[in-house]
Amino acid sequence: MNYLEFREKMFDLACFNTDQVYAWQPGFDRNNLHRWTKKGLLIKLKQGLYTFPEYKKKPDFALFFANRIYKPSYISLHTALSFYGMIPEAVMQITSVSPLKTAFFSNELAQYSYKSIKHELMFGYQKSTFTEDRALLLATPEKTLLDLLYLYPEYDSAQQMENLRLDEDFLSNDLNPKLLNEYLLRYNNKALTRRLNLLYKTYDL
């Protein structure tokens, strides 16, 4: 099989795994993937998962791949804060949460960090369509804040809360207080409730 034939079949998937390749071509020579990656014709996202170099230049595809590198997972924490404009700076890693163990992956597109969370806390995310009818799983702003305060217990002082530099207009005008409280009850965690109340106090909410 030549590369052009392979590319025509797989390119629109954005990323693909070896199972998909073998489902299409049971006799496919896996050495092709290694050779094409070495030539720069493919990018290895993780073991057994690949994309094409053209997707490095396409906006938000690095986020799109985060859901597929480690499943199940959804984007949250500092990446989601930046996505919503809740913090002023861009973030270096793409951060997600997953019911699986904590994990980290690095490839040509980005560094991907996954924090472990209980299965019962896998809620509060939605499909966000970004381009070409592609969708990524992204925490709501309310779940993003709660995930952050739950998984980073060091945010336990007014100074630490101020260091987050959260956008006060967003907190006041764009957060849904009712939804935030509904989510908080599902955590059933006194320390999280205390940290959220501290955030309210720090930002005069």
Image (tube, rainbow, N blue to C red):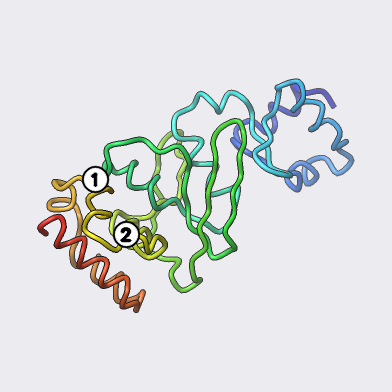
Q: Residue 115 at x, y = what percent? A: 50, 58
What residue appears at the point 52 percent right and 63 percent down from the top-left corner? 116
**Above or below 123: residue 16:** above
Q: Residue 70 at x, y = what percent? A: 59, 52
- Which circle marks residue 165 in the picture? 1
Label 2 residue SS: loop
Give the alpha-carbon distance from disc 1 to disc 2, as whole Å: 12 Å
Q: Which sits in the foreground, 52 or 103?
A: 103
Residue matched to label 2: 155
Position of residue 32 in the picture relative to residue 107 (left or right): right
Q: Quadrant of residue 180?
A: bottom left
Position of residue 167 in the picture relative to residue 81 (left or right): left
Q: Amino acid at mark 2?
A: Tyr
**Above or below 71: residue 183:** below
Number of numbered discs: 2
Q: Quadrant of residue 103?
A: bottom right
What residue appears at the point 28 percent right and 59 percent down from the top-left corner? 142
What residue appears at the point 41 percent right and 65 percent down from the top-left corner? 123
Position of residue 202 in the picture relative to residue 49 (left or right): left
Q: Quadrant of the C terminus?
A: bottom left
